[in-house]
Image: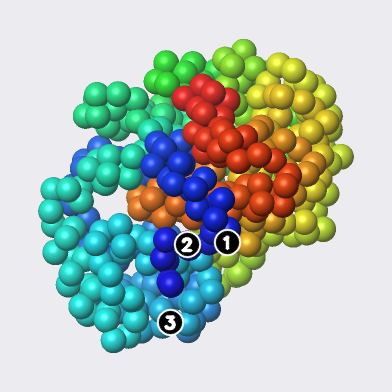
Amino acid sequence: MFLGPDYLIGNETGKRIFAAVKDLPIMDPHNHADVAAIARNENFRDAWELFAATDHYVWEVLRKAGVPEDRITGNASPHDKFISMANVFDQLAGNPVYEWIHLDLRFLGVTELLSAETGELIWTKVNEILAKDECKPQALLKRMNVGVMCSTDDPADTLEHHRTVNRDFGRVVIRPTWRPDMTMKAGTDGFPAYIERLGARWETKIATLDDLLAVLQKSHDFFAENGCRASDHGLELASTGTGDAAAAAETFRKALAGESVSADEVANYANYLLGEFGEMNSRSGWVMQLHIGAVRNVRDYLFRTLGPDSGGDVSDIFQSHEGALIPFLNRFDGRLKVVLYCLDQGHQATLAALSRAFGSTVRLGSAWWLCDTPIGMKRQLEYIGSVDLLSAFAGMVSDSRKLLSYGSRFEMFRRILSSVLGGMVEAGQMPEPVAMKLAGTMCYEGPLAFFDL
């Protein structure tokens, strides 16, 4: 049965494990939530805004199914975009987007399958539901039992929306995450303007690398005061965290002045800066999340017409991360908590082995982005259980901009985890009570403790 009680669970023990963990509070150490929208707490305007307007996964499969760009990111009305999605939705079967959106519909109480025949009906039905108070963003978070979610935030952010949401909830629900990626992009067109904006935020003229680091420490301290527990870093290639300070300072000067800098200069600068971020995190007791391997903006048409982060990113199995990660992990061995995420399934083995080698302070992150599918999560869980420790898994993350992802993506993960552990029980690899405890650790207690949430 489609999305029935046994969805993704292939054994009887797994069903019992899922029953024990399905209602645990959601711990999400990494997402891209629109915190300002959650703070405004206004009803979603329509079904397209809720299901697809911010979801790159949806955009990419709709393009693949032949939907024109005007009806994905263009000027077509939300109604026409939604109907265009409905018209091709049967073609998406087998891709997790097909399951995620139907899980989202089920959460709202809509039982019809989305298709060309039902598009208008579901559009009308969902819009009527979304007009109710119980479908405002904050109410949806409560209904999905979100315990803590960690947003992704620039060092220049003021975080007032986080304070608003947490005040509205009467507890800490959204924690900021410090993501200083833009400071590492020396030589890009927007770098000088970004540094000027960052300096203005902190009322400091940033003229040297020392000035930049001083401002970033102020930002880091401010984030800590506002409940931050982690930094996050998007790296195409892993970094050594070591670099020549004088050369990095000269690279910063040149980039700030708009002068050209070489790839080697940028690499040294980025390595040096990431090492400084590691020191800041170590002093604050934060977790340092390294998202490694995204090759950005490979489709020229999308980058030219829509800009970055529009669904034109891929992975590369031929990247090598071990050589850079070893010096980084050795520099901070035992004094910095690190989570390693990779975008390509082929890199899981390397990261799992490194996580095992460097002990309790280094953990393997969830199957990410192109890997956070049923097959990707299952393969990762089976592999890390044999190489690393499942009990030391860093936990599921939504990595999403879409609010309902806390329901659909976490349900998918918990079902797959339950099936994997149930299969191990039935294969005689562990007793059922141990598997039950392990499932609770991986879904809740583990990330709660490791990230100090």
- Badge 2 amino acid: Asp
Q: Upstream in the sequence, badge 2 or badge 3?
A: 2
**Residue 6: assigned label:** 2
Spatial separation of the CA atoms under disc 2 and disc 1: 7 Å
**Residue 90: assigned label:** 3
Query: Toward the viewer: 216 or 410?
Result: 410
Spatial separation of the CA atoms under disc 3 and disc 1: 24 Å
Task: Say what secondary structure mark 3 lies in.
Answer: helix
Spatial separation of the CA atoms under disc 2 and disc 3: 22 Å
Residue 438 image offset from top left, x and y in percent:
60, 35
- Badge 3 amino acid: Asp
Single out the mark in the foreground, 3 or 1. 1
Q: Residue at x 17, y 72 (%)?
A: 124
Q: Is residue 224 visible?
A: yes
**Residue 10: assigned label:** 1
Q: Is 180 positioned to the left or the right of 40 in the image?
A: right
**Residue contact between numbered discs 2 and 1, judged by CB atoms under 8 Å:** yes
Q: Upstream in the sequence, badge 3 or badge 1?
A: 1
Q: Residue at x 22, y 72 (%)?
A: 123
Query: Toward the viewer: 409 or 2?
Result: 2
Task: Say what secondary structure mark 2 lies in.
Answer: loop
Query: Toward the viewer: 338 or 99?
Result: 99
